[in-house]
Amino acid sequence: MEGGFWCGNPAEKDFWNPTYMDHAETSRQLKVTFSGPANHWTDAIPIGNGRLGAMVWGGIATETLQLNEDTLWTGVPGDYTDPDAPIALSEVRKLVDLGDYAEATKAAVELSGHPSDVYQLLGDMKLEFDASHMKYTEGSYSRELDLETATARVKYSVDDVEFTREHFASYPDHVIVTKISGSKPGSLSFTVYLDSKLHHHSQANGRNQILMQGKCPGKRIQPRVIANGNPKGIQFAAILDLQISEGGVSHIIDDKKLKVEGSDWAVLHLVASSSFDGPFTKPSDSKKDPISESLDALKSIKSLSYSDLYARHFDDYQNLFHRVSLQLSKGSKSNLSDDSLEMNKVESSPKNSYFSKSEDGAVSTADRIQSFQTDEDPSFVELLFQYGRYLLISSSRPGTQVSNLQGIWNKDIEPAWDCAPHLNINLQMNYWPSLSCNLKECQEPLFDYISNMSVNGSETAKVNYEARGWVAHQVTDIWAKTSPDRGEAVWALWPMGGAWLCTHLWEHFTYTMDKDFLQRAYPLLEGCTSFLLDWMSKGPEGYLETNPSTSPEHMFIAPDGKPASVSYSSTMDIAIIREVFSEIVSAAEILGRKDDLLIRKVREAQMNLPPTRIARDGSIMEWALDFQDPDVHHRHVSQLFGLFPGHTITVEKTPDLCKAADYTLFKRGENGPGWSTAWKTALWARLHNSEHAYRMVKHLISLVDPTHEADFEGGLYSNLFTAHPPFQIDANFGFSAAVAEMFVQSTMKDLYLLPALPRDKWVNGCVKGLKARGGVTVSIGWQGGDLEEFGLWSMEQNSVKRIHYRGTTITAKISAGKVYSFNRQLKCVKTYLL
């Protein structure tokens, strides 16, 4: 199985295959490779099963697996209400109505709340080998992440012995597994132990087990020890179980380390658990015992060999990963072998001099990033696209927490931006690829999370804003915090986070057509809609307004020349509300609730929403008034929400707004952090502008030197993590979703093929297994920059699709359980049963 062979059922991507492609030529390896051990955390290899994560450094004499468990956070459940907020809100609204935006901005600080809690780390698994390993054979070292199998591997030779390490994180068995072996019998000796930056105690439990217990701080900043003053935080346990070959021996050192001598191989099982029992249970009241849960996890795999564990991991992972494939080529003048040769043409740059080639001249992924600006290797785009899918599978699975600002991977007690999910684009972008890239199960933690936030959010809405329904703001945490963030209104005052998240509920239905899911999700949409109706009020022009309103993290110059961030009816506010209102009306019709009082109120409100306005310079206005923008290159592109991820600005229906959106993107410029670059890629794709979409793809692929990361904006680290900087995972996910938008766009009735394909860059190609709205799966092949063939199928839905390609439109009837194959003239030439 190491080579990716699989004897199970065919993957969904293989339900349709193009007739013109040589399939032997399409199997390029999807591996992230390294020329040496990690020197920095962003050189390490991430593995994960949604709940447990590890960063594999690949050291030789000493190895570190930096560990995470997704429920380790500071704090306890909070009170996310402020009884003084209504008075402050009234004052802010009055100032906005008077046009005194600078004073309204100052007054709005009174509406801010407390900061989120902080994601923590679990600890480290440390491996120490004898000094001979420092004298490894020159050129023998390799380290890689195989995306096909979700396995990290390290290999090197010492004299005539080859040492191999394999690491994977199993979702079905809730364990991180490491196998270490030597090529000669009895050649393996090492010491292993667990450590943590958190308060902990570690000890050996016999000669084959280490138990580590610890706790997270009960407050976000590690408090001084005050008698009875600190709440009990989340408790945790990790157990390392050791198995060695016959003939090997193990013994205990210093009561907390295990030393292995003379073994052929060793298998390490790392399990971990915490006392977290949901966002509404105090750790002090939790009945969960992390030690017994960890022991149970070990007990459940006691009878499974390493091969058994690997096979179960492999089948589970490939069931998700192998749904989609992507193959890109520059064309006949630069075929696949030419592309691989070009990867070797690495030009050194003083800015990136930290990185160098491996000793044997093999091409590392860092080399490939560095050379992309000149060779524009299409196979690297394939790798980065699939890496985003790999990270989503690894950081968000049914039953886990949502993928946070860094997925599940974090090395710090006080990580950047608390590693907390941010609701003004981060958390949403994390889940953009879940539907189009055929990973719908990975979105389940998001729906659980939205449900939890609706509970706290209903209290925040009632107390802070005297409104019905539920609300969430900009930053949240494991306790489902819904109150405003602390500090300035420019980031803290943004009550649209919950509404944006609710659009994911409807999107899930449009892709899956799962009516039972829509029935379960509808109360969340209802609550969100009720809040929005109460939040808005009629303004002097007769339109419904949001007041106060900000455009996320962006200031403007008020008419009196003063900087401000608070006004009314920012374009993003109205775009999100328009989206939510449209969705709940559509959902109500499907569920037979179109005559509900709430829906009648929504229909009336829809007619009174302000239009999307075009500014004097021809761009989309970001605020309700045409304020002066002090930072035209600001990283957020909030005024374009209606274009993407929304659906109210479209090439076909709103050409004038699309023209204005085009100029807005031009004015914003190409620079910005990684997530901004990914968002702009998707926006250009929605405008069917392949040239600019590709330019943003290329812009992201820039190598960041972690020793001088402040000198960069956006870019990639050597392990393909995307940089803000520092590391934020959202652009990894945003990139995959944006590339999918370049190939396929859809509505419930329409399907647009290759709407933003850069025909001169990806001349030939094939993408298989992408999802479209209406429950349809799409595979497309093209040659010479033009459509060659495509296949459509639906597992459960009968539907009628309008299929669009370069000005030609056809209508196709799709019956469930059948594959339809079309030629370049959009004519169906073959059908067969799934």
Image (cartoon, rainbow, N blue to C red):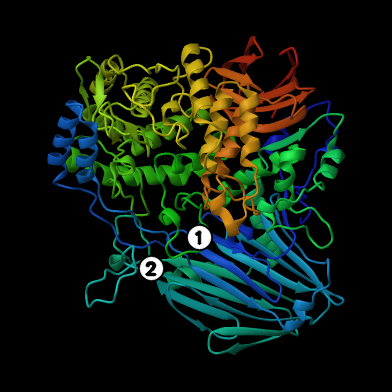
Image height of 319 relative to 631, above or below: below
What residue lies at 24% left-to-right and 76% top-to-bottom? 226
Q: Which of 91 and 142 is in front in this view?
A: 91
Q: Which amino acid does label 2 sit on?
A: Cys
Residue at which label 2 appears: 216
Mark toward the start of the polypeptide (1 vs 2): 2
| In-front residue for pair 156/139 | 139
Identity of the residue drawn at 31% across and 50% down = 481
Q: Residue 410 carries which label?
A: 1
What residue is shown at x 38% (from left), y 66% (from top)?
Answer: 275
Q: Note whether residue 171 is visible.
A: no
Residue 18 falls in which quadrant of the image?
top right
Gap in angstroms between the C-alphas marked 1 and 2: 14 Å
Mark 1 secondary-structure assignment: loop
Position above or below: 411 against 107 = below
Between 813 and 201, the one lying in front of the other is 201
**Could you tell me which secondary element the residue under label 2 belongs to?**
loop
Q: In this view, does 47 lie to the left or right of 27?
A: left
How packed mark 1 is, by other alpha carbons closer than 10 Å (few <14, some 14-19, many 20 or more), is many
Q: Where is residue 819 in the image (x, y as percent from the top left)?
A: 69, 25
Specify the quadrant that holds the C terminus: top right
How many numbered callouts?
2
* Percent x, y of residue 595: 28, 18
Q: Is residue 240 above or below residue 434?
A: below
Pinpoint residue 325: horizontal percent, then vertical percent: 70, 37
Q: In this view, does 140 lie to the left or right of 190?
A: right
Question: Where residue 565 sits in the image (x, y, percent)?
Answer: 30, 35
Residue 135 falls in image quadrant: bottom right
Number of other residues with Cα within 10 Å of mark 2, as a class: few under 14, some 14 to 19, many 20 or more: many
Q: Is residue 42 above or below residue 205?
A: above
Given the image, on which type of amino acid does mark 1 rest? Asn
